[in-house]
Each structure stands twice: as C-alpha cells, then as structure tokens.
Amino acid sequence: MHIPMHRYEYTKLTRDQIGTALRATENGPTSASAYSNALNGRSLRIVTQNGPVLEYRFQANKRLTLSEDSGRNVSAGYGELTQNQMVFFSHMIPGEQKGYNVAIDQNTNLVTVFEVWMSSGIVQGAGTPNEFTLDDREVQRQIYFGYVDNGQGVPENLHHYTNRIAGKGLYWKQDTGIETLEYYASVANTNFVELTRHVDDLSFVSTSDYVLVDDRTFAYNRTECEFSGIHTCFVADLYNVEQVGVRFGFNENDELEYYMFRGEGKVVGQLAYLEPFDEHGMAPMFAQGNAQPAKGARSTYRPARTFTWMSDEEMHAAAEQRTSAFGSGDANASTSTLSGGNNMPYSDILVGKEFTVRLDHGGPVRDYRFRDRTMLEYRDHSENVWRDADYRAYEGDENLAWFSHILPDSQPRASVQVAVDFNNGLVTSIESHMGTAYYGNETTYRAVFGAIEMEGVEAPLYVRHQFTDELLGHAFSWSYSDAVTSMHLYGSPHSMSWTIFTGNQTMGAQWCSPCIYVKLRDGVYLFCQNEEACNGVQMIALINTNISHDCGFSFNGGARGVSLTSVGGIGRHIGKYDLDEFYGPKKRVEA
Amino acid sequence: MSILNRGKAKKRASADKSRRSFFWKLGAGVSGALAAPAVMVRAEISEQDSASVRLALLEEEKTLRKLHQNFEQAMDKGLSEEVIEMFADDARVIFNGGLFVGRSEGVSRLYRDRFPSEKTGRRMEPAPGFELEADQQADRVDVSPDLLSATAVFPYSIQAGAAIESETSLANMARLQGEGVKTWWEGGVYHVNYRKDDVHGRWKISQLEYRTLSRADYRPGRSYARPIAVAAIATRYPEDPQGPDSLLG
C-alpha cells in the first residue's frame, strides 16, 4: 500500500455488502498455523460480568454451537490456538454481523470475551453540528470479563484493564509474514507501523484495549478506526514474546480478512509511564467520568470529521483577508498557539546583522537585514524587491539563530523558518506554504539546505545540515504550559505520534502525522510536522536535547486567515525504542 | 472549615472567643450538647423569649448547617441533581459575575452543565500561601425570629476551572478524554439566603453568592502556587449554552 492510510479513500461499505461478505465467515477463520484442539469435545458455560452468559459445545471439525443467555443454539465454525495455558478462539455468528473472540486461562478458568460486530449504527456527537454515524465497516468491540462456570462459584478476581503494558514497544512477525512495530504508548491507543503492508513505514494510531491476564500474559485489541476499520485481537506472552490472535475486517481493497495467526516478536523498548505508582489502570480511559458507558464506547480521536475542507482559492481569499504574524504581542514575550508559558525567550541575536541565505540546488536566495527584534527586510533574488516582515528569533543553541516570517503577498500564502548556524555558516530553511493535494487549508513544507554569505563567516561548500534518524525511537514530553503537555514519539524516520495525558498523567488520547527530522548540530535538531487530515497545522520546532527544550513556530490557515505564531515547551526524555534495524531500504530488500 | 488556614491557630482562637461570648448571652438554658457545634445565632432574642423558641432557633441553625454540609458533599461527589434540589424554584446564584436564575433553568445550567464541564465546585485544600485570614473563615447562620428565612456565611475552598479555548488538536484530544479544562484554586465565602418551603416546610436555598477572595494557580501536590486573574463570565445564555441569565457589574 503506497497511499498513506490517512489519505486513502476507504469505501463506505453498506450493511448489505458487509452481510453478504460475512457469509464467508460461517466456517470460521483461516489460519496459516495448524489449529490446536484444546476445546474439541468440551462444553463450556462462560459467565461474564455485566455481559452475556455464553454456553458453548465444541464439536469435531472446528464446529461449535452457542447459546447466548439461554437463547437458541446457533452453529458456527471456529478457530482455536493455544499458547501456554491460554486458549484463544474466534467465531462469527451466521446471519449476524457479530462474533466473539475469547481468551480462556485454563489454569484459572478466567475468561476475557471480546464481542465484535459491524454495521453498528452508532451515532456520535448526537444533536451537534458534527453529528455523524460510524462507518458500517468499522469493527466495534465490547469486552467482558468472566469465568468458565464449573460450579466453583464466582471468582474473587477477574481479568481486568491494565496500564502495565503502557509504554512497551514490540516488534511482531506473524505466521503470515506480516511484520509490525507496535508502540503501546497509551492505555487506550496503539501507535503502530506496518513494516510489510505499507511502503512508507509511517506510524498510525488505532484505539486499543489492554487487559492483564497475569504478569506475563496480556490480551489486546486495536481497531483501525477512521481507516479500514479492521480489528486485530490477540493474547501475548511476554516471557517468550509470542502471540496468538485474530484479524477481522475489511482491508483497503474491501477484501474480508478473517484469519487467526501465531506470531513471534521482541521487545524494542519501554517508555516511562508517569501516572501515580498506586494507579494500575484498571478502569478503561473512556469510562472516566462516565460510570455507564454505552456498549462499544471507546475514546477515538476522529479529527477529519471536524476538519472543514477548503479549496486553494477559498484559502487564499481568507489569507488576503487576514495574515497574521505573531499577533500584536509584546516583542519581548513569546506568544504561543498553545497557551504559552514554557517557550524559550525571543532573542536579539539577529539584530543589526546582514547576510544572504543561499539554498542549494537552485533553491531560494534571500538577502536579509534585521532592523530590530521584530522587523526584518528581505530581498528574494527571484524578484529583487526589498520587503518588510515581522519576525521572531530564538537563539536555539550557541550562536545559532532560529527565526521565521511570512512571505508577504505570496500565493499560496507562505512562510519560512530558518536556522542559521553562524559558527558553521550553514542554513536550513523550512519552506512552508498553504495547500496540499488534499486540502487548501493544510500546509506543505520542505527542508532546503544551504549556507550563508556574511562578512566574517566562511561557509563550507560541501558540508550541510542533513536529514537525520538520531531522534528515531525517542520519546519526549513537551510541556507548553502547566496545562498543556504532549508526548512526542518519534516512531519512524518519517512520522511521529503525539499523546496527551489524562488528569493523573496516564498516557491517553493519541494521534500521528508524517514529519521530517534535520540535524543541525549534535543534540540540536529541527522537527517539522503537519497534522495532515487532522487540522492542517504545521509545527516547526528546534529541539535542543542538551537543555531539553524546544522552540519554534506554528503555521496554519483556515477560514479566519493565515497565522504564524510561536510555540515551545519544556521537555522530559520519556524513553527510547531501539528501532534502527527495522527501517530503511536495506531492511525492505531483506523482507 | 478546618481545611482553611490550618496555620493560623492564634487568629482562630480569637474567633472562638467571640462564639463563647455569644453563648454566654444565651444563658444557662443552652445545653452543652447544643453549644458544641459552635453556634452563633444572631437573631434578635428578647429576654422574654421562651427557651423553646431559643431551642427552635438553634435546631433550625443546626438544620441549615447540615444542609450546607450536604451541599458541599454533593458538590464533592458531583451529584448535580441533589445540589439542584436544594434550591428554591426561583433561586438565584451569583458566580463569577454571572447571575443564574431559577432552579430548573439558570441554577440547573450552572450545576448540571457548567460546573461539571469546568471541573468547578469540589472542595480542595487551600493553595499554600493563599489561606484565608481567620476573620474571613468565620461562619455564621442567622435565623429569622419567625423561623421562615435565614442568612448564612460559610467559607469555601474549591477547585474552579474554565475550558481551554483552543481548537488545537491537543485541546480537542483533551476534550475527548473529559479534560481540556484549566483548573485553579479558589477561596472565598458563600453568602446564602435560605427560605422555608411553603409546602413541605423544608429549607431551600433562595440565593447563593460565591464571593471570591483569592485565586491561585495551584493543584494538590504541587509545591508552589501563583496568583492568577480570572476574567468574569462575559457571555450570557443562550449565546453561551451554559451561561448566566444576566451579567453583573
């Protein structure tokens, strides 16, 4: 797949289309690995807490009969895989668009039941301008904790939600040959990379649940909401890093996938999780403040649902009405799009300086004169006209200026973010403008490298700043203010995710975007991302890991015009995954 | 209200002295058991009033203190409907420059919608360095001689908050998980008017005013607090679906 999931136009499959396709599930899932036979010939009565009583009879040839809450018996094909003491089985219910994935601990008789269904008709934002119905192809799930009723009475403890998996990163390779990197950097989401299914190694985010079976075993699922809607559910043993599970749903080609798998993997790292030590995450995040959530409830960030599409023409008309650079704020105080407070101070490092930025390969050439802390003059050699512009600058590292300004009268409206290394005579310019192939109100950016021409500076001819993977695998929390903190996980060479914390600093809601990383100096980097198919906002930050601080700019546009503001936060290093071996052309050739 | 100003024992002793003085005026007819809750009824009580009237006043005062205690507990537990039920039909609440009128309208908007969404109203320890002075902590219940109305002053120390007004993805994601609210500590005094329900003879709050004396950027567990300014409510209902019926001042 070469179209990123957030850009792919998934078919709006209808209930009828789905129902027809699901007939293929009546004989149960397929599996590349041989099925186990732990359940053959057994009858199980599974009692769940706040859920159904499931009475199963498992027969030969991978057939079962099921009675839900003493209802009629239905017959279905099923698949079953064991792992240590766990037996995991999956089946659909013929004629219905639902089924069950069930994990039984044969030592304790404790059970976690995942009910799954399609064509949910769930309405979100009811009564608001943003009301919408979930896509029928999106697999829904409801988790029930219970036990196999052998007349032993109700167990004191059942399986339960957990934060014990939070922060772990795992590489998995299934018996299908499919490889994934899965970063469990939230109690309610997974940030994952499809190493074999996709060509760009971008990371994406899907809502997830984490269930603790015992100290070495957890049960898990994720649903690729807002994308294909496909569902992956498994039980994993972290001693041997093995999994047994099922994948169910429609892929990007609208092909039904319903298969079970075994997988092997490795732990690639662990991020710190920051909630209180006595917080064990036993309540799902979506239930906080909602004691009785509706069946299937989950906290899924669906930003494209509220992102209003604008054409290039509409966007430019709005930019002509209003283009704002740094508002009208105090020149001595950093303003921010994120309730600033922790940004780095503006610098006068450029005041009085004159130089030329000459970018490589026919890139822009601009002469600069810096009048004071907030106003500059520049002349682009392509037009040979001096223009005034508001700007702000930081000293991101010793004798390293980092500034930004709008390119007045540009169409589409454009801005630049420029890092000038006076020690080395090097320049990187992030050339940004409004508009992508998808939205007029999204931003586009590119990094262009070059050098400065300035009296007293000997700029190199060959040495340049360059793209880097030195941040790959690292996670930092960035506190833009005491009220706003986001953890950035640099999970692939061309993408990142951000996670916000709940009130007790549990890692919660999460989303992702493509991005670029540039190395300026040891420990000093540029990071640039556009929240694509989200809100189109571009963040361009200089990250100085030596001081654990970032500083930079936000460029965005919408119906209210175009805005360039500043942004920056205090960082904490949260941890690192070891990912180098998984990325790059060499890896893909080997795969 | 021992949670307020724990470090101000000396000034609190002064307040206690005034209460003892008042009890002395009540005379020997007041039992020690009745005196224990630190009563201070300022109703005009003539020497001719019977002991039963005085006892009735004290009983009503106790009832009102219990009602206020229930109010704070319900606020702590987020039991909005119980809170709303404590108000009279035509009750008024004054909060941060806004006047919310009517139990089923403005008062419901405030306690059912605005306070929960802004994480406002639960008791919270005072921000360090921002404790109210002893004279600001003095509580008082005045029951009218006819036992049909009363006024009271109670100190409060609560968490207050306001939605972060931002359309950034971070703010939207925070709202998704029930947050996106900036909170702070707020201390002050409730000025409460009570009235007896005509039908059932139960006390109802006819007016409640939050008179804020101090605010600080603080949350429990933090080692510091900073003073903050909070803008008064500026948008009325229905422009703001959770707004007040009118703006004051």
Image: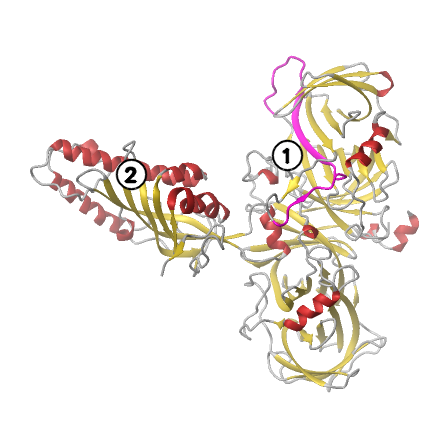
Q: As displayed, is residue B87 above or below residue B169?
A: above
Residue A530 picture quarter:
bottom right
Whether residue A464 appears in this view of the structure is yes
Q: Position of residue A338 (x, y in %)?
A: 59, 61
Pick the residue in front: B188 or A121.
Answer: A121
Left or right for B135, reference A70: left
Callout 2: chain: B
Left or right for A322, reference A494: left
> How dense is the environment of label 1, judged by Cα within 10 Å: few (below 14), some, or many (20 and up)?
many
Looking at the rendered structure, the kind of residue marked 1 is Tyr
Whether residue A260 appears in this view of the structure is no
Q: Give the SS element for disc 1.
A: strand
Looking at the rendered structure, the kind of residue marked 2 is Arg
Number of the label disc, if any, that sits on residue A513:
none
Magenta span: helix, strand or loop, mainly?
loop
Which residue appears farthest toward the left when viewing the image? B48
Q: Position of residue A369 (x, y in %)?
A: 68, 84
Q: Magenta region: which residues?
A: A129-157
Disc 1: which residue: A161
Disc 2: which residue: B65
* Residue in the image at 73% along x and 16% along y: A72
Discs 1, 2 touching: Cβ within 8 Å:
no
Q: Position of residue A143 (x, y in %)?
A: 67, 31
Q: As displayed, is residue B198 above or below residue A410?
A: above
Pick the residue in front: A350 or A574.
Answer: A350
